[in-house]
Image: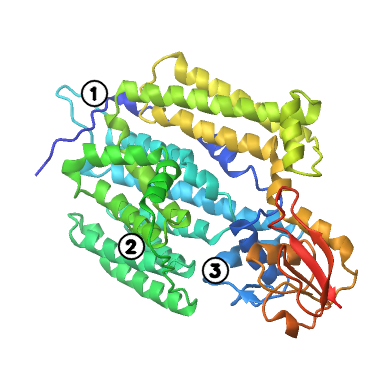
Amino acid sequence: MNLPTPAIVAERGVERLPRLALILLCAAYLLPGIFGREPWRNADLTAFGFMASIAQGHAPWWQPAIAGIPAEGGPLPYWLGALAIKALPFLDAPTAARLPYALVLAGVFVAVWYACFHLARTDAAQPVAFAFGGEAQAVDYARALADGALLALMASLGLLQLGHETSPELLQLLAVSVYLYGLAAAPYRRGRARLAVLVALPVLAASDAPMVACTLGLLGLLLNHRSSYDAAKSQRVWLLGALTLAVLAAWAFHGWAWRLQGNTDIGSLLSLLAWFCWPAGPLALWTLWRWRRHGLRRHITVPAIALLVPLAACLAMNGSERALLLALPSLAILAAFALPTLSRGFAAAVDWFSVFFFSAAALFFWLYYLSMHTGWPARPLANLRRLAEGFEPRFSLLALLFALAATAAWLALVRWRTARHRHALWKSLALPAGGVALGWLLVMSLLLPPLDYARSLEPLVDRLKPHLPAPLSCLAAPGQSLPTLAALEWHGGWRVLGRGPLAESACSHAVISAGLPTPAGWRVVAQVKRPTDRSGSAGLTLITRD
């Protein structure tokens, strides 16, 4: 039965987003932050520590480890960074490790674009046909929605937070996006779609998400079984093969942990969903409402199954934002199908909110930059020196030029969008995506020095170095976090032992967490803390044998 579609789109509504503008926007999102910064503490530094341990020969390829502590998940994500470090010796190791992950994020963008493009080509997704012609053509309509999906993905705050790390979750994100493409393209690109699912599920399982991989595979089998497209039905045997490979990959890499973490606080989960999925989340909900009569059609069910599985994983893992990251491609695709149904008033509200919010953020960044380098206004620099003890601003002409170009591009985008009404479907997401790219580029150019100083553990290690003898056989660090151990190994260049009782250690020196009592037979040499640690609770106490 042919149900009425809520999409009413004229030919002028599928105006193509200029490819050069789209490429430049993607570059402004992908490239900042790759060069000129150290690995930041927590997941970014931990993942880099595993990569560096392999590249430097401190741990085997099959079992990455930091200070003798092995990685919990599969080694595949760490192989990417380790191979890049060894293949690009002329670059510093952190930069080399980030390059393949920038390509991974670019792959996510490409996969989401083509997944939405093929879903928008299905018969049920087409706009209303006008009595006398003039409706949007199928390919042009699909291209406009795909542009909107990519803009929605780039505008997502969750991707902004986690998308620039060198962490396993980014490889999982690529695998989910490629799997989405494999299901979406099955009726149109039979060979490529089969290859996509055959690669995506094993990679997802080998990247420490085997339960997500297997659940997605089973739901994909069910979806294709009831599909009206013969090419989609024929994909079932390839999905079975992909599921088999995923199980084998999970078994080989010992990655069957689901990591249940007890009861999830509903209030915290709702708060996470509200900001992490903005603005794609509300648009996706609007799509599910407006297209509710088409709930069993392919353009809704394909992204829906790839949305429900990460949501369930997030819930099972106590509201994990890293599990929720895998839902963003599906949310972006669903958000794109809301665009043909939005009112002018809603689009105008989004535009003005974006203009004021991102322009105010850009002004704030520029004021901090002026304060750092000219002393005016005085308060930002005073706050910065109070919060980051010992920080001294450094000037970069290249960073200033990039920031000026980004600001000029933002002003041009605002003028273009507000000068007169535009009919393109993707118009409502141009300013949010451009604003996010602007904010990220400005932070990574104007404010990178203080941010790097605050979020890197290098200053902590630098304060520790003067208190240690130059030839040091080993440094014991029992009970320390993986980021701290990685910083001691990478920035300090020491052989660090993170396991075993301190009493049985053969090392002459050790570090313990600040505030802990000094063990018997040891004496305190020094106490150090991060420059941004006001309480000293995150500091280290260096001890030596009495």
Say left or right for 133 vs 342.
Answer: left
What's under tag 2, amino acid-wise? Answer: Leu
Say left or right for 394 vs 454.
Answer: right
Residue 432's x, y, as percent? 47, 32
User: Where, quadrant-wise, is the N terminus in this rendering?
Assistant: top left
Q: CA distance from mark 1 to mark 3?
A: 50 Å
Residues 175 and 182: in front is 175
Say which element carries label 2.
Answer: helix
Residues 396 and 244: in front is 396
Say left or right for 446 vs 260.
Answer: right
Is 143 placed above or below 497 here? above
Residue ID at (70%, 41%): 448
Residue 276's x, y, as percent? 45, 45
Labelled disc at residue 76: 3
Say which element carries label 3.
Answer: helix
Residue ID at (49%, 46%): 159
Pick whichever of labels 1 and 2 is earlier in the sequence. Answer: 1
Q: Mark 3 and mark 1 in contact (Cβ < 8 Å)?
A: no
Of all residues, the one furthest to the left in this rendering is: 1
Is 161 placed above or below 316 here? above
Mark 2, residue position: 216
Mark 1, residue position: 134
What's under tag 3, amino acid-wise? Answer: Leu
User: Where, quadrant-wise, is the C terminus in this rendering?
Assistant: bottom right
Front of the two marks 1 and 3: 3
